[in-house]
Image (cartoon, grey):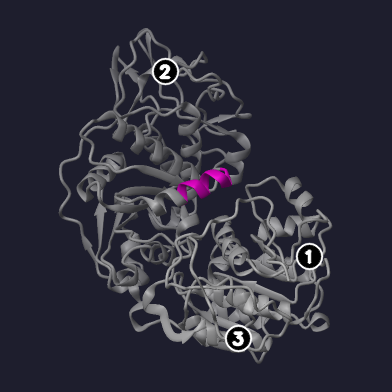
Amino acid sequence: MSNLKAQRTHLPRVRHASMAATQARIQPSPIPVDYSIPIPSQSTSSKSTGMATDKKHFTSKRFVDAPISQLSKAGIKHEFLTDVQDATLELALSGIDLLVQAKTGTGKTTAFLLPAIERLASSRSMSSDKGKILVLAPTRELALQIEEEAMSLLAHHPYGVQSVIGGTNINTEKTRLNSPSARVDILIATPGRLLDHLTSGLTLRPSVLILDEADRLLDQGFRKDLERIVKLLPDRRGTKRQCMLFSATFDKAIQDIAKIYLNSDYKFISTLHADEMNTHEHVPQSYLITPLEDTLPTLVSLLEQAGPQAKTMLFCTTARGTAVVASILQQVSAASTQSMLPPIYQIQSRMSQAARTRAAQEFRDAPEGAVLVTSDVTARGMDFPSVTHVIQLSLPSSPAQYIHRLGRTARAGAAGEGILILMLDEQFFLRLPEIASLPLMPYTRLEQTRTLNFKLDDRSIGQAYSAWLGFYKSWLKQLRWSPTELVKQGAVWARCLGWPNVTVDDGEPSTSGRAPPQRGARGGNVVATWIPPPIAKRTVGLMGLRGTPGLNVVDRLDDAGDGPARKAGGGGRGHGQQLPKAAKPHTEGPSNNGTAHPPRIRRGKAKAGP
């Protein structure tokens, strides 16, 4: 038999270090095998796939003694099974449904892929049916990590794996899926993209359905998508489909979904160690309360205090916010030859998949310190070793998300620290029952902050401002804000990002922090006015902010330009340069940033509503 390789056409194969071949004891195999295939000498770590396994989870049981085929053994990089692999292998091979509680870094990906591949091999099926094994994951990054692991396990099997994920060209995916030369025995997918394919004609008949990070699939609102996906698959009673759910937590929501997707005789297995049950209760945690306008200088001071050797994950509330914070940190770092900031990376959902994958790998491989500015796409599922600090900038979306983010540090017994930065009105979060029970202490080590020098383009500020309003709109009750107060605070955030804060009153320019007046108020022969970033009428309607004073509502956002007012530049506290009295703020004009095709936005006048 030739040494067949798993097929995948859209990503380069991961290269593994060559290993000396050793003769392994031959085990009974469910399919004919070529016993001349060498079994690599195995280790307890894998650097190639990014799915590193915590050494404390390895057992004394060896894969050479496991009831799996020689073909599968040839693709395994470890000598010993982990506890979750040992606990689930024989049950999964039997075809019974499983609900498994296991954390990232425990070898859980192999735990569900290996028995699924073995069941596929034992069926001796070489049909061209797509997605005989279907794996659903909540994020693109996790889906790609699972695909890499599948590639390794399939190295000596005559099967292929592909992924379909958001952020990539769906027509390219359709071409790959329909290519007669590319097998799709295993399909890894994010729910939204899979639903797109299923509703446009893709037919799947999976014999194994796997939901990885099932709790996170629910957290991110995929439940309705999952229900639609299952309805578009053949009835499991006719296909005898096995289903496996893997989750880091086991709460009522998971129990409810288990009743829907699993047979009533399913087995529940938990492999959490005692020190993993409530890791968030043992990580040193502190909080900082600061005015909104001081948030960014406070953040920079914290990062500089952590030092250039610190490996920090910095969580932001929105993708747009992540982008501007990353840009600010990069500019602050580049502006000073004595900066204590390590290299800055970012991952957020608006980035291309290639850029996200590259940033994740570079942060993961950083030999010394690094900062990953990220939205919640990395809060769970992805493995980033040696994270020393988790900083959460502003309000987490929920207490559970606070805990999930915190879990990125102090892993495998290593030291770590969590810091939460809140503005004054966000202190209610500390009083929530799930948070009040945690050992959160006031942060008392902050050194003096400083004014930051950076410049963001109008479009980025406008997008971050709009996203900020959208995020905080859902917290009005807890914040005790009216819609008018929300808009007022949003204006403060826009000024923090460098949107020109220009008011002219009695002939004297001012950069006061008071709320912007809706219309120009004439005094003598000067006009007092402040115009916030424009926001589309449709967006205002979706936010439920129609008629709210202080918004700069426009019919639509086009690419209308960085005006001369951008010369006001952005300081980290929102104190940019003042415009001359004669300058008219926010008029259209050419960009001064030297970019060949600068982003442009349409200006409008502030008004009460659409």
- Nearest to the eye among marks 2 and 3: give it: 3
At label 2, the amino acid type is Ala
At label 1, the amino acid type is Lys
Q: Real-space Cα distance between discs 2 and 3?
A: 75 Å
Residue at image coords 49%, 54%: 474
Q: Is residue 170 above or below residue 156?
A: above
Secondary structure, mark 1, is loop
Q: Identify which residue, 468 or 337, lies in the foreground.
A: 337
Q: Which residue is mark 2?
A: 565
Q: Which residues are magenta?
A: 352-360
Label 3 Cα neighbours within 10 Å, binned few <14 / some 14-19 / many ≥20? few
Q: Real-space Cα distance between discs 3 and 1?
A: 31 Å
Q: Looking at the image, do the residues carrying marks 1 and 2 touch, with CB atoms under 8 Å apart?
A: no
Residue at image coords 27%, 52%: 310
Q: Which residue is mark 1?
A: 130
Sequence-wise, the earlier of marks 2 and 3 is 3
At label 3, the amino acid type is Ile
Label 1 Cα neighbours within 10 Å, binned few <14 / some 14-19 / many ≥20? many
Magenta segment, prevailing SS (helix, strand or loop): helix
Percent across and percent down for residue 438 are 29, 71
Residue at image coords 42%, 73%: 44
Q: Is residue 481 visible?
A: no
Which quadrant does the C terminus fall into? top right
Q: Please state the total of marks drawn on the protein image.
A: 3
Q: Looking at the image, do the residues carrying marks 2 and 3 touch, with CB atoms under 8 Å apart?
A: no
Quarter where residue 573 is shown: top left
Percent across and percent down for residue 81 are 48, 81
